[in-house]
Image (cartoon, grey):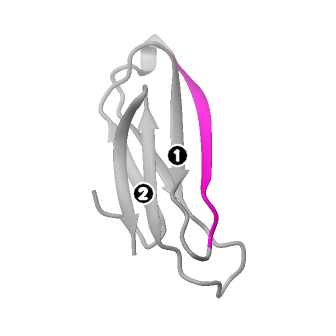
């Protein structure tokens, strides 16, 4: 999978089962930026199970003009690795 832009990773799940799913994103860090991660829970209702869902993780430096971001972004859903993107 290639980055959507310089600091983004993305994946699409074609359909989801009904219930609560956990989505996670983690960043490996580099020489300029610390390791970071976040999770969220999403409730999928019966109406939305046939709709594809796209998740995007964006790594953003705290200041404009800061050092470029590099490293790896991992995106997970339903306890499985869905995307691994190496940033430039």
Q: Which residue is mark 1?
A: 25
Count of all numbered marks drawn on residues in the image:
2
Spot occupied by residue 4 in the image (x, y as percentages of width and height): 38, 64
Q: Is residue 4 visible?
A: no
**Is residue 39 one of those drawn in magenta?**
yes
Residue in the image at 33% along x and 22% along y: 50
* In the rendered image, the vertical position of residue 24 relative to residue 47, given as above or below: below
Q: Is residue 77 visible?
A: yes
Residue closest to the far right:
63
Element at badge 1? strand
Q: Which residue is mark 2?
A: 9
Residue in the image at 57% along x and 26% along y: 42
Spot occupied by residue 68 in the image (x, y as percentages of width and height): 54, 81
Residue closest to the far bottom:
65
Residue in the image at 60% along x and 37% along y: 39
Spot occupied by residue 45 in the image (x, y as percentages of width and height): 50, 15
Segment tinted magenta in the rendering: 33-44
Q: CA distance from mark 1 to mark 2?
A: 9 Å
Element at badge 2? strand
Spot occupied by residue 43 in the image (x, y as percentages of width and height): 56, 20
Residue in the image at 53% along x and 49% along y: 26
Residue closest to the far front:
31
The quadrant of the rendering that contains the C terminus is bottom left
* In the rendered image, the vertical position of residue 45 relative to residue 8, given as above or below: above
**Is residue 41 one of those drawn in magenta?**
yes
Q: Marks 2 and 1: in contact by CB < 8 Å?
A: yes
Q: Is residue 44 left or right of residue 86?
A: right
* In the rendered image, the vertical position of residue 87 relative to residue 45, given as above or below: below
């Amino acid at each position: 999978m290639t980055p959507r832009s310089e600091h983004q990773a993305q994946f699409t799940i074609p359909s989801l089962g009904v219930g609560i799913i956990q989505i996670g994103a983690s960043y490996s860090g580099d020489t300029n930026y610390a390791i970071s991660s976040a999770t969220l829970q999403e409730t999928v209702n019966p109406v939305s199970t046939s709709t594809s869902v796209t998740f995007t993780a964006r790594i953003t430096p705290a200041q404009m003009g800061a050092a470029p971001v590099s490293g790896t972004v991992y995106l997970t859903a339903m306890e499985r690795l869905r995307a691994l993107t190496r940033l430039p």
